[in-house]
């Protein structure tokens, strides 16, 4: 299996589904371009990946690293399936 270096830091939708089914979890934190903590500059979120994950995984999704995201980005992540976000106070 070869993984594009740029994709190595993001959730693979098929693997996410396999993991969810194998473990019986009730929610799933997925990586679409966020990280814990505040950002020096706005992250580039992969909304198309999130849409793809949503097609493969029928669980509430968790967004880690929502601190510093714009209101518009947070609203979009909710629209696309995030049920929980973690925020850090500055």
Image: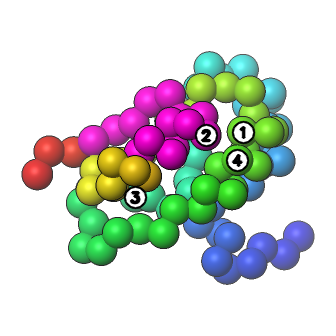
Q: Do the residues labelled 4 and 1 touch (CB within 8 Å)?
A: yes
User: Which residue in the structure is indicated by mark 3?
Assistant: 35
Q: Is residue 73 magenta?
A: no
**Which mark is drawn over residue 80?**
2
Please state the extent of the stretch shown in magenta in the rendering. 74-87
- Residue 76 placed where, x, y %? 51, 45
Label 4 secondary element = helix
- Residues at marks 3 and 4, CA–CA distance in whole angstroms: 19 Å
Residue at the image point whose x is 72% and y is 39% from the top: 54
Single out the mark in the foreground, 3 or 2: 2
Q: Quick one: which residue is furthest to the front in this view? A: 72
Label 2 secondary element = loop
User: Does the rendering let one see residue 74?
Assistant: yes
Is the residue marked by circle 1 packed among few (<14), some (14-19), or many (20+) residues within 10 Å? some
Label 3 secondary element = loop
Horizontal side of residue 74 vs 46, given as left or right: left
- Residues at marks 1 and 3, CA–CA distance in whole angstroms: 20 Å
Q: Do the residues labelled 3 and 4 touch (CB within 8 Å)?
A: no
- Residue 10 placed where, x, y %? 62, 61
User: Which residue in the structure is indicated by mark 1?
Assistant: 54
Q: Quick one: which residue is furthest to the left in this view? A: 90
**Which mark is drawn over residue 14?**
none
**Which mark is drawn over residue 51?**
4
């Amino acid at each position: 299996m070869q993984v594009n270096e740029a994709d190595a830091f993001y959730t693979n939708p098929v693997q996410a589904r396999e993991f969810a089914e194998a473990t019986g979890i009730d929610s799933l934190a997925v990586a679409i371009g966020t990280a814990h903590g505040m950002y020096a500059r706005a992250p580039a979120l992969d909304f198309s990946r999130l849409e793809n994950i949503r097609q493969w995984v029928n669980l509430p999704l968790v967004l880690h690293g929502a601190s510093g995201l714009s209101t518009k980005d947070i609203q979009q992540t909710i629209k696309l399936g995030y049920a929980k976000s973690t925020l850090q106070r500055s």
